[in-house]
Amino acid sequence: MTARGRRHLLRPLAVILAGLALQGCISPSADSIGRYTSPIGGSPVISNETPYSAALRCMSGIVGQHPVRIAIGQIADYTGKIEADGSGRKVTAGAALMAMTAFSKSGVHMVERFDTSVAELELKYANNKLIGDDKNPNDGDFRKIMAGSIPGSDYYVVGGITELNFNIRSENAGGTGGGTATNATTGTLGGAMYVMNVGLDLRLVNTSTLEVADVISYQKQIIGRQISAGVFDFLGTNFFDISAGESALEPIQLAVRSVIERAALEMITRIYRIPPGSVCGATLNSANDPLSDRPYPYPYQASNQPGPAYRPTAYSMENSNEARQNPYRGYSGSDAVGDVRLRGRY
């Protein structure tokens, strides 16, 4: 058989082999659990952590004993950056949800103000006497609307993602080398790195007076890299061109979560006057965190015992209601520590 005839026979054989290979992945009839194919993957669900999650959870032993109620408001994306293909925004629109998770990790007593649609609908049904007793729906009993049943917030957090700067700096290098003969082996190697950043601005606002009690502005840099290599060689009458590459970008949305959790950690530390040398400060799971030893401008009372033994000055008062209304009591004037300012006279 001629070489041309063998090529004509190889083509349908290749098609048949490809079909047999695909038959092992996709079936024209569903299996016993209703699937045509089994999905790839199988990575387990894990906790969504940042380098500051451990420090936030450490604080739950301190802040959980005190009655300050905090609500999370709108934390919007103010960068204005969208994908080039129009598929959506570059930065998550769920920053407020990330902030709720961050404050929840630290045990802060939160009240819902972000999405009250279900509560408002339930209130409407209860007002029309439509919500009754589930066990005895025909006995005429219905949910009562009690004045003052919803606790108010003492402070609320608002702000936004204000920076997304691409390619702050990039570096790349590459090279090609090999023999000078026509059929000599040649190789290529190259790599590149680039840096971008995200920025966040948050405010802590007194719900009763609308005074801005605390402002925090943080940013985090994000790094990406690309590496590629290739070999081109002749072996007899055949040639081979082999290349491989790897690229990685630190997740942008995880960077946003990290900035939010670091801001929440700072804000909670200021609200409760937790000393920077406390045991929670030592749990920062971030190498050489530049903010781990920041000074704080107001007095605090601490003992030699870690955890709940640290008592904020405001809560040393017997009247806890007064403390709840103003956890910054005892600090007077306006002072600045880095990018955080405490305003007003208390």
Image (cartoon, helix red, strand yellow):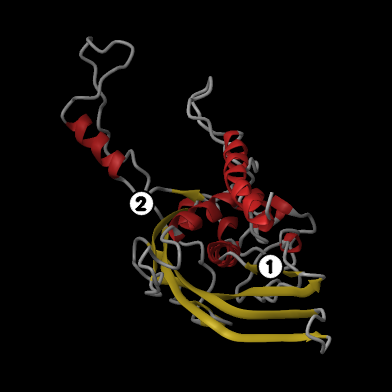
Check the image and report above or below for 315 versus 250: above
* Visible residue check, residue 319: no
Above or below, 127 against 132 in this view is: below
Distance from label 2 to label 1 (Cα)?
Answer: 44 Å
- Corner quadrant of residue 224: bottom right
Q: Nearer the viewer, residue 106 or 12?
A: 12
Above or below 188: residue 322? above
Residue displayed at 58% across by 34% down: 23
Which residue lies at the image location 20% right of the left edge and 36% below the top edge? 124
**Which residue is identified by label 1?**
246
Q: Quadrant of residue 219?
A: bottom right
Q: Crowdedness of circle 2 by 10 Å Cα count: few (<14), some, many (20+)?
A: some
Q: Earlier in the sequence, mark 2 or mark 1?
A: 2
The location of residue 284, given as percent across then percent down, is: 72, 63
Q: Residue 222 appears in which quarter of the rendering?
A: bottom right
Residue lying at 15% horizontally and 29% vertically, measured from the top left:
128
Outermost residue on the left side: it is 128
In this figure, which residue is indicated by the disc labeled 2? 113
Q: Determine the secondary structure under disc 2.
A: loop
**In-front residue for pair 160/30:** 30
Task: State the image coordinates of residue 157 (x, y, percent, origin top left).
Answer: 43, 62
Amino acid of disc 2: Arg
Q: Is residue 59 visible?
A: yes
